[in-house]
Amino acid sequence: MMLKTFSPKAGDVTHEWYLIDAEGKTLGRLATDIAKLVMGKGKPSFSPHVDGGDNVVVINAAKIVVTGSKLVDKEYHRHSGYPGGLSTVTVGEQLEKHPTRVLESAVKGMLPKNRLQDDRMARLKIYPNAEHPHAGQAPKVLGDK
């Protein structure tokens, strides 16, 4: 008897909702856990060409922890495209102005660079404090590991 390999289709996927409290968690370790959930790597039906990940709501992103001297030493660069248009901001400054962007860029850097990346990032919702508008989806709270 010959068994066929199961290959999931886009219609077969169900997206769960998860809630993660980022207060006191380390940036990189939290970002890897979020990237795994958004990609769906923990599911038995994982396939790299199908967007089978889950929705993730992250609260208290402003209270995330960065180890060592990364608050001062680690920098984010962007360029406007004009001569002399390089802008640099440290992690500490970014956490004060836009605390959600630090975690968002960390998770985006851990996702594969393909056409599914934008869809996966759209399922990631990050909020700087404990309030979020996704209570209607009844997200499952993920505790400490």
Image (cartoon, grey):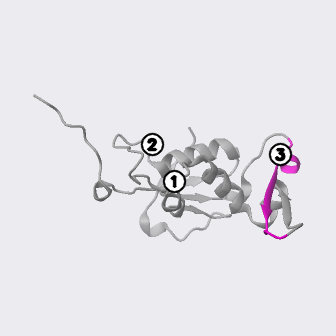
**Mark before the other along the chain sequence, 2 or 3:** 2
Q: Which numbered disc, 2 or 1, marks the residue closer to the eye?
A: 1
Of marks 1 and 3, which one's residue comes earlier in the chain?
Answer: 3
Residue 44's quadrant in the figure? Answer: top left
Looking at the rendered structure, the kind of residue marked 3 is Lys
The residue beneath circle 1 is: 114
Q: From where the camera sits, is residue 103 visible?
A: yes
Q: Residue 92 bears which disc, if any?
A: none
**Whole-number angstrom distance, CA of label 1 to CA of label 3:** 29 Å
Per the image, label 2 sits on a secondary structure element best described as loop
Q: Which residues are magenta?
A: 69-82
Q: Which residue in the structure is indicated by mark 3?
A: 70
Foreground pick, 41 / 118: 118
Q: Residues within 10 Å of mark 1 (few under 14, many from 20)?
A: few
Residue 125, percent from left and from top: 56, 63
- Please check the rendered image and state whether residue 59 is part of the magenta-colored stretch, yes or no: no
2 and 3 marks in contact (CB < 8 Å): no
Residue at image location 28% in from the left, 55% down from the top: 12
Do the CB atoms of the residues marked 1 and 3 lie less than 8 Å apart?
A: no
